[in-house]
Every structure is written in structure tokens, then in C-alpha cells.
Amino acid sequence: MTDLREQIQKEKEKKWMDGRAQSREITKEILRFGVSQDQIIHIIKMLALELEDHAMMQTICRATDIEEELDQTISSKIIQPGGE
């Protein structure tokens, strides 16, 4: 009985590790494609919109929106020629 539980646990761990390895490969491929920091944030938000966990999706979207708000605040404080 214990052997069966250990085998099931090992299979779950292997599946989890394989999933993590695949995620790292996808991330490497995206970075190899050559994306900017803004594109990375947008990709994160677009992937978040695909999540089944609504609360997690909202949390990630709010976090990426904060980044966009910070960028807008910083750019709005830059003095433009002829402006204040």
C-alpha cells in the first residue's frame, strides 16, 4: 500500500517537474524572440486573461496595470518643448 502511494507521489512530482521544465523552455523561446520589457508585461497580462482562476487573473492584471500606470506617470512628468 505504501509503495503504491510512493509511486503515485513520484509520478505527480515528475509530472510537476516536466511541466516546470516546459514552462522554462517556453520562456526561453519568448526571450530568444527578442521582446522588450513592455512586451513582456503585455504577454504576462495576455496569458493571465487565459487563466481559469478568476481571482489569480485579476491579481495579475492589476499588477500589470500598475506597471502601465507607473510608465504613464513618469512620461507625463517629462517636460515637453513649449509645455509645462
Image (cartoon, rainbow, N blue to C red):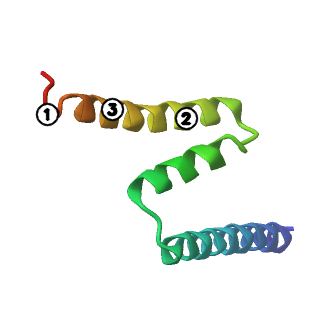
Q: Which mark is residue 61?
A: 2
Label 3, residues with CA under 10 Å away: few <14, some 14-19, many ≥20 = few
Q: Earlier in the sequence, mark 3 or mark 2?
A: 2
Residue 52 at x, y percent in the picture: 76, 40
Residue 38 at x, y percent in the picture: 43, 51
Contact? badges 1 and 2 (CB < 8 Å): no
Residue 73 at x, y percent in the picture: 27, 29
Give the alpha-carbon distance from disc 3 to disc 1, as whole Å: 18 Å
Give the alpha-carbon distance from disc 3 to disc 2, as whole Å: 16 Å
In-front residue for pair 4/45: 45
Location of residue 23 with respect to 60 vertically, above or below: below
Give, as a three-letter code, the residue at label 1: Pro
Q: In the image as oriented, which residue stretches furthest toward the front?
A: 82
Residue on which the image places disc 3: 72
Residue mark closest to the camera, 3 vs 2: 3
Give, as a three-letter code, the residue at label 2: Cys
Residue mark closest to the camera, 3 vs 1: 1
Q: Earlier in the sequence, mark 1 or mark 2?
A: 2
Label 1, residues with CA under 10 Å away: few <14, some 14-19, many ≥20 = few
Residue mark closest to the camera, 1 vs 2: 1
Q: Which mark is residue 43?
A: none
Residue 4 at x, y percent in the picture: 85, 71
Judged left or right of residue 44, residue 12 is right
Give, as a three-letter code, the residue at label 3: Gln
**Which quadrant holds the N terminus?**
bottom right
Q: Secondary structure at mark 2?
A: helix
Location of residue 47 with respect to 63 vertically, above or below: below
Residue on which the image places disc 1: 81
**Which quadrant holds the C terminus?**
top left
